């Protein structure tokens, strides 16, 4: 996909993850507010590695230079004991995750993958 095609898709559908999940409106706004990059397809370092791409060296700084784009990721809380929960509500915690746009990555060369 060319840069223009990716941006047109992002404008139409929104920002998606490397796995194809649409980001929440909150996380999309969060990314737009943190950087000048026009995000289209995002993923964490390990997600890009699994997808056959690698984040280019030095791709981390934005405005201000020390900032790294982050999003909030939901995570279910693990129970320490195996007892059943009394309430039907599940405890969901959020943590932050660093993400990179596809424009900050490149295809892993076969010699690097071996």
Image (spheres, rainbow, N blue to C red):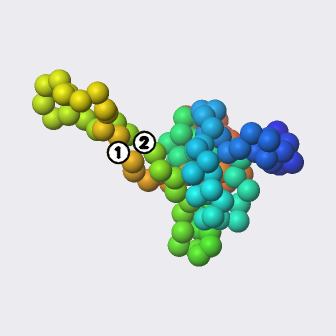
Structural crowding at the residue carrying mark 1, measured as other residues with C-alpha within 10 Å and reported as few (<14), some (14–19) or many (≥20): few
**Left or right: 76 as drawn, with respect to 62:** left
Q: CA distance from mark 2 to mark 1?
A: 6 Å
Q: Left or right: where does residue 94 sit relative to residue 39?
A: left
Q: Quadrant of residue 6?
A: top right
Single out the residue that lies furthest toward the bottom.
Answer: 64
Q: Residue at x 39, y 50 (%)?
A: 95
Residue at x 53%, y 39% (from the top left corner):
47
Q: Residue beneath label 1, please?
A: 93
Picture quadrant of residue 50: top right
Toward the viewer: 35 or 57? Answer: 35
Camera-nearest residue between 23 and 19: 23
The image shows residue 92 at horizontal and vertical percentages of 35, 40
Whether residue 76 is visible here, answered yes or no, is: yes
SS type, badge 2: strand
Label 1 SS: strand
- The image's mark for residue 9 is none
Q: Position of residue 29 (x, y in %)?
A: 62, 56
**Number of residues whose C-alpha sits closer than 10 Å to that of mark 2, classed few (under 14), some (14–19) or many (20 or more):** few
Question: At x 62% / y 69%, what residue is drawn?
Answer: 62
Q: Quadrant of residue 81?
A: top left
**In the rendered view, does 5 fall on the left or right side of 110?**
right
Percent of width and height locating residue 4: 87, 48
- Residue at 73% x, 56% y is 38
Residue 74 screen position, x and y as percent: 42, 42
Q: In the depicted view, which residue is nearer to us: 14 or 107?
A: 14
Q: Is residue 108 visible?
A: no
- Quadrant of the image for the N terminus? top right
Counting residues from the N terminus, which is met first, the one under dot 2 or under dot 1? 2
Residue 74: image tag: 2
Mark 1 and mark 2 in contact (Cβ < 8 Å)?
Answer: yes
Please count the marks in the image.
Answer: 2
């Amino acid at each position: 996909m060319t840069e223009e095609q990716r941006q047109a898709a992002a404008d139409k559908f929104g920002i998606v993850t490397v796995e194809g999940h649409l980001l929440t409106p909150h996380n999309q706004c969060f990314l737009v507010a943190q950087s000048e990059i026009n995000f289209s397809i995002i993923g964490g370092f390990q997600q890009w590695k699994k997808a056959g791409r690698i984040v280019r060296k030095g791709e981390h700084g934005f405005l201000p230079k020390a900032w790294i784009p982050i999003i909030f990721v939901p995570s279910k809380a693990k129970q320490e004991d195996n007892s059943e929960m009394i309430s039907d509500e599940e405890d969901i915690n959020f943590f932050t995750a660093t993400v990179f746009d596809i424009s900050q990555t490149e295809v892993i060369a076969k010699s690097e993958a071996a």
